């Protein structure tokens, strides 16, 4: 699918879905701090939040990796 290979859409997804809600801190940062602290008390919904908010960043890292390490460029 073209949407997974368009860096502009992926940046937009990272800035909206990846960081929402923005206040008091981006949701994904709070979850990553929680995981770094041992993930005590995390339930299924918390792990789902990590996957949901982290997926745009995974796709962006993937497209950057493909751009820099592809043999065609």
Image (cartoon, rainbow, N blue to C red):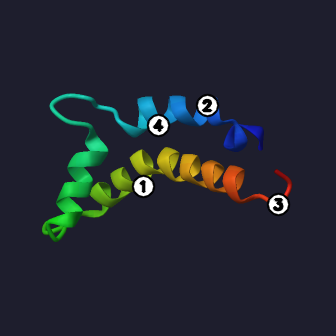
Write the residue at 43% across / 29% down. 16
Where does the image place residue 7, in percent across and percent down from the top left? 64, 36
Nearer mark to the viewer, of 4 and 1? 4
Q: Secondary structure at mark 1?
A: helix
Residue tagged by mark 4?
A: 14
- Dot 4 or dot 2, earlier in sequence: 2
- Dot 4 or dot 1, earlier in sequence: 4
Q: Looking at the picture, tell me which residue is in the foreground, 67 or 25.
A: 67
Residue tagged by mark 3?
A: 71
Residue tagged by mark 1?
A: 51
Residue 24 falls in image quadrant: top left
Write the residue at 77% across / 44% down. 1
Q: Looking at the picture, tell me which residue is in the foreground, 36 or 21.
A: 36
Nearer mark to the viewer, of 4 and 3? 3
Residue tagged by mark 2?
A: 9
Question: For the residues marked 3 and 1, what is the alpha-carbon distance in whole angstroms?
Answer: 30 Å
Identify the mark at residue 38; answer none if there is no mark.
none
Question: For the residues marked 2 and 1, what is the alpha-carbon distance in whole angstroms?
Answer: 18 Å
């Amino acid at each position: 699918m073209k949407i997974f290979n368009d860096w502009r859409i992926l940046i937009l997804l990272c800035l909206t879905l990846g960081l929402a809600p923005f206040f008091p801190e981006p949701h994904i940062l709070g979850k990553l701090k929680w995981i770094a602290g041992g993930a005590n008390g995390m339930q299924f919904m918390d792990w789902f939040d990590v996957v949901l908010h982290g997926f745009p960043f995974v796709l962006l890292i993937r497209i950057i990796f493909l751009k820099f390490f592809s043999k065609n460029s």
